[in-house]
Amino acid sequence: MTTGHGTIPAPPKADVVPVPAGRPKVKAARTKANLDTTLHREALAHAKYMPFAAHARRSGNTALARLWEGTVKVELHEHLAGEAVLAGLVRTTRTNLRTAITGEHNEATTVYPGFVKRDTAAARYWRNTAADEVRHAVAFRKALNQLR
């Protein structure tokens, strides 16, 4: 799309990286720490760019929306996926469920309640989010209990 200020680039194409279950491919502590950082940053980029794209589309800037959406696909299917493989992020279904339960439980009982105590401006939001996290943990626990 050409604007009065130039042309918006075409969206990038993602090279989809399959993420099989498996052990970490790296052992060095620094590399593991770097993977943790990059996994979080790629996930955050994905989470930010989707509403950016939606806003651009609502504003009538479909070329920019397509650029955000194409970039999201690269962030998720290429960058995050490649890092997930290196980190051994995906394991057995049982292990994945246990990991999810632990994370949701921690958010519900420690992270968000801590925010409520320290951040009264958003306390109601944090309490509601904590309640959602409890429901997520319960759903994952139920799924785990139903595995054969």
Image: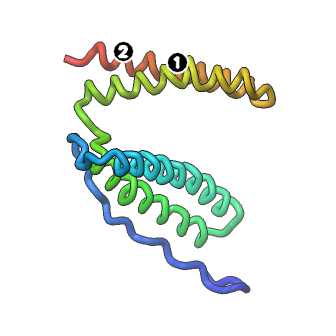
Please tell me which residue lies in front, 147 or 120: 120
* SS label for mark 1: helix
Disc 2/disc 1 C-alpha distance (Å): 12 Å
- Please name the residue shown 37% across and 56% down the image: 77
Please tell me which residue lies in front, 107 or 77: 107
Q: Which residue is mark 2?
A: 142
Mark 2, other Cα within 10 Å: few <14 / some 14–19 / many ≥20: few
Which amino acid is tagged 2?
A: Lys
Residue 120 location, x and y as percent?
79, 25
Residue 105 location, x and y as percent?
48, 20
Please tell me which residue lies in front, 37 or 99: 37
- Please name the residue shown 60% across and 59% down the image: 53
Q: Quadrant of residue 142?
A: top left
Relative to 6, residue 65 above or below: above
Relative to 95, residue 148 above or below: above
Which quadrant is home to the N terminus?
A: bottom right
Residue 139 location, x and y as percent?
42, 19
Residue 111 location, x and y as percent?
59, 25
Q: Which residue is mark 1?
A: 134
Relative side of 94 to 1, left or right? left
Mark 1, other Cα within 10 Å: few <14 / some 14–19 / many ≥20: some
Q: Quadrant of residue 82?
A: bottom left
Which amino acid is tagged 1?
A: Val
Relative side of 75 to 87, left or right? right
- Please name the residue shown 47% across and 53% down the image: 42
* SS label for mark 2: helix
Relative side of 111 to 15, left or right? right
Asked whether the residues under the numbered discs 2 and 1 touch, taking CB atoms below 8 Å apart as contact, a structural biologist would say no
2 or 1: tag closer to the N-terminus: 1
Relative to 122, residue 14 above or below: below
- Farthest front residue in view: 29
Q: Nearer the viewer, mark 2 or mark 1?
A: 1
